[in-house]
Image: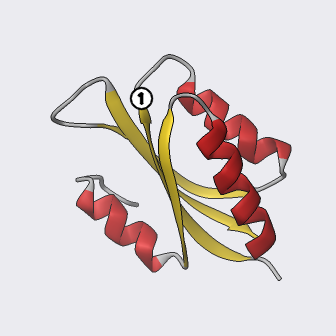
Amino acid sequence: MKRDYTIEVAADNNFSVLNRIINVLNRRRVRIKQLVAHEDEHDFRKGGATMLLHTTPELIEKVKHQLEKLIEVESANFYEGSEVYLELSVKNNQKVA
């Protein structure tokens, strides 16, 4: 059964890294409900993305492993539920509509 998951990705702030992340999700037909990308305020070469995804437990595991294989990605962590998405977005000083 499909559920909401929050995934947090820390990566280098390189050209097309966001595109590569989205391609991983598109190949697996994972629905993106919300996405917030940000640059690290202390180091402009680092950044990240927090995404609210709607998928199955098996597929979120596969997506996490695929994201970690990307050269630019340092880490990828996922959490069940949309409440974590709001907390992480506020932590990264983002406005969530």
- Looking at the picture, the colour scheme in use is secondary structure
**Other residues around mark 1 within 10 Å, as few (<14) / some (14–19) / many (≥20):** some
Q: Which residue is mark 1?
A: 12
* Residue 7 on image: x %, y %: 54, 60
Q: Residue at x 71, y 64 (%)?
A: 61
Kind of residue at disc 1: Asp
Q: What is the total number of numbered labels drawn onto the structure image?
A: 1
Residue 24 lies in quadrant: top right
45 sits left or right of 36 in the view: left
Residue 43 lies in quadrant: top left
Mark 1 secondary-structure assignment:
strand
**Which residue appears farthest toward the top when viewing the image?**
15
* Residue 42 on image: x %, y %: 15, 34
**Which residue appears farthest toward the bottom when viewing the image?**
1
Residue 26 visible in the displayed image: yes
User: Looking at the image, is 95 positioned above or below residue 78?
Assistant: above
User: Looking at the image, is 30 positioned above or below residue 66?
Assistant: below
Nearer the observer, 57 or 92: 57
Q: Residue at x 30, y 55 (%)?
A: 95
**Which residue appears farthest toward the left when viewing the image?**
42
Nearer the observer, 60 or 22: 60
Residue 56 visible in the displayed image: no
Q: Residue at x 55, y 27 (%)?
A: 17
Specify the quadrant that holds the N terminus.
bottom right
96 sits left or right of 58 in the view: left
* Residue 38 on image: x %, y %: 35, 40
Q: Residue at x 35, y 64 (%)?
A: 88
